[in-house]
Image: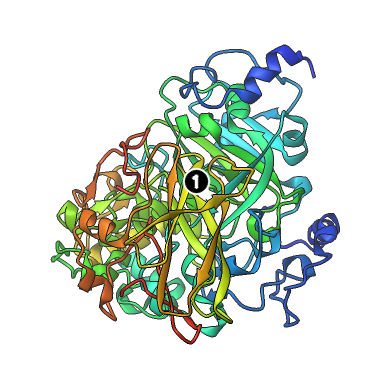
Amino acid sequence: MRCSLKVLAPVVMLAAAIPAGVLAQSQGRLFPDVGKPLTEKEIKGFDRIIGPEGKELPVGHGTAKEGEVIYKQRCEVCHGVNGEGGILRRLTIGKPGQPYRGTYYGKEQEKMNGVSYYPVPTIAWDYINRAMPVPNPGTLKPNEVYALVAFLYYRNGIINEGDVMDQTTLPKVVMPNKDGFVPAKPVYPPEKAPSWW
Amino acid sequence: MKSNGSSRRGFLTQTAALAGVAAGAGLAAKGSPAKAQGNVHNEPPKRGARYTIDHMTHYTPLHEYNGVITPSRLHFMQQHTSEFPEIEADHHTLSIYGLVDRPLRFTVADLKRLPSVSRVHFLECHANSSLAIHTQGNENMGLPVQYIHGMTSCSEWTGVPVSVLLREAGVKSNGTWMVNEGGDACNFSHTLPTAKAMEDSFVAYAQNGDPLRVEQGFPIRLIVPGWEAPFSVKYLKNMKVVDQPYHAWNESMNHSVARPDLGGKVRWYHFQFGPKSVITRPSAGLHMGSKGYAQITGIAWSGGGKITKIEISADGGKNWREGKLQDPVHTKAHTRFTFDWDWNGQEAVIQSRATDETGEIQPTLQDLSKHWGITMDEWRQKDNKPRAIHMNAQQPWKVNKDGSISDAMFA
């Protein structure tokens, strides 16, 4: 290793006082012989982390009708007909044309499982793509994920049956519970005591 | 190969590497292990476990060990899949990308070449001590102190500070958040502020001197000290630096909660745990034996730093006396406490409250309820108890005249 102990010690102990980015930013590497550079092409090949603006969404498209076919084959066994619930989570809490806008507290807390609860439209895409269906997660193609999201959002009354979900339209969907979370932008460091705020 | 794929060769490699850990796994079950657990190292506990179709839980028997290090085999576990991933350690990598100057990929061997730290820290599930579980226990889940509070454990973890890794990659000035992703079947993902990652988080490859156990994220996991454990992503494979919280499913749905004091709205992120403690012996389901000397012992911890004071009440919180904290006291770690008690054979309600170095005092359930706008009657409901996460209320245990002990949380 090329670096001296003098340089190394502060890096290891750096801990507390240093704000994000300051030490990490725009300097050369201390351990250039450890690890390998990643190319943009390699990153595109494995990155499945989708942000709330949908910038990373892959090219593709799907409709509720297409999604219904896939849903019946891959999802219904656990989540029930039209997402109404089965041995696993109920995903539908509204009706076509009538999104759920009620509370998620007390007697209604089970409704949290529905996709209507998500404040951001891309969460369903990210999660279905990474974690579903349970026996073989990661096997759905982008068009299939778009179609499943379209189907679930249609059944929840969030979009119309004919709406096409793609990398441009999905991030623009207005979720019925988009204002149901506080704070909208969490902050760090966390608010002052009590820490169980 | 896919990191969560099945490979006989890889599995054997992993088993061989971990064989040493198996020795002395005294509480291991004699029952047949699940498919992915073909070695003693990874056998489930004979009780203190709950398995569902898409979820596995192990609860730590807090009353059954001493000191502050949870024996590795007893460490609690929450896994959002039905099997553990069989990861081939020799081929597992950690990729750092997104808003960085130099996207990098490290093998596990690479990580072990970098400067390391060993630190004692607790981990705790965001849902530990939830009020609903007080009435949901069964014999497979152990005693109340285990299934109510046993989703916290404490280990000495060894690994590379995230600050070292981010220094290598060079974080861009707008890289204020990160999304960390695991290599289990659900590709578990969770957002973390870059500032916390730089402050004291690290990528661990060892637990109490041994390699990580399979259920603890073998071969590598993140440790985010003092914060809700879902931040400490297991089977860590990707760290993506981003410019805003990504609101992954686990934080926007699974780990959020609606509250009356917020007008029914949902608290999005909880980060650091407040001061907390629980008496582990005597506790519900155990028996006092004869009257006279009875040492009260338990653990205290806080995400705010070191525990500075422990107080014990034997009359349900009316009067308090200071207990002893056992050295060494680590920061953001379980701390053992004791209290010499002379039980007079009469009814008593014993409980502990911890204070941490920030001066914060562990609240009562009444304190929390008032703050959250929830009534005690709502907690007492049999069904539809409000969802409660991030819970650090004091736990009262009732000692009865006959020496039996019961849970007095809702008394």
User: Residue B169: x, y in percent?
Assistant: 59, 24
Would residue A76 be found to the left or right of residue A27 on screen? left
User: Residue A124: x, y in percent?
Assistant: 36, 56
How many C-alpha atoms fall within 10 Å of the one at disc 1: few (<14), some, or many (≥20)? some
Where B179 sits versus A37, above or below?
A: below
User: Residue A93: x, y in percent?
Assistant: 23, 70
A48 or B28, nearer to the observer: B28
User: Residue A28: x, y in percent?
Assistant: 63, 13
Would residue A115 be found to the left or right of residue A10 on screen? left
* Residue B54 seen anywhere in this rendered image of the structure: no
| Quarter the C terminus of chain B occupies | bottom left
B163 or B147, nearer to the observer: B147
Q: Which residue does the image show at 70% across and 18% down from the upper left?
A: A8
Q: Which residue does the image show at 28% across and 56% down from the upper left?
A: B368
Where A152 sits versus A175, above or below?
A: below
Where B242 sits versus A23, above or below?
A: below
B6 or B167, nearer to the observer: B167
Callout 1: SS: loop
A9 or B318, nearer to the observer: B318
Given the image, on which type of amino acid does mark 1 rest?
Arg
Q: Quadrant of residue B257?
A: bottom left
Colour mapping used in the image: rainbow
Q: What residue sits right under mark 1 in the picture?
A: A48
Seen as rendered, the residue at the extreme bottom is B402
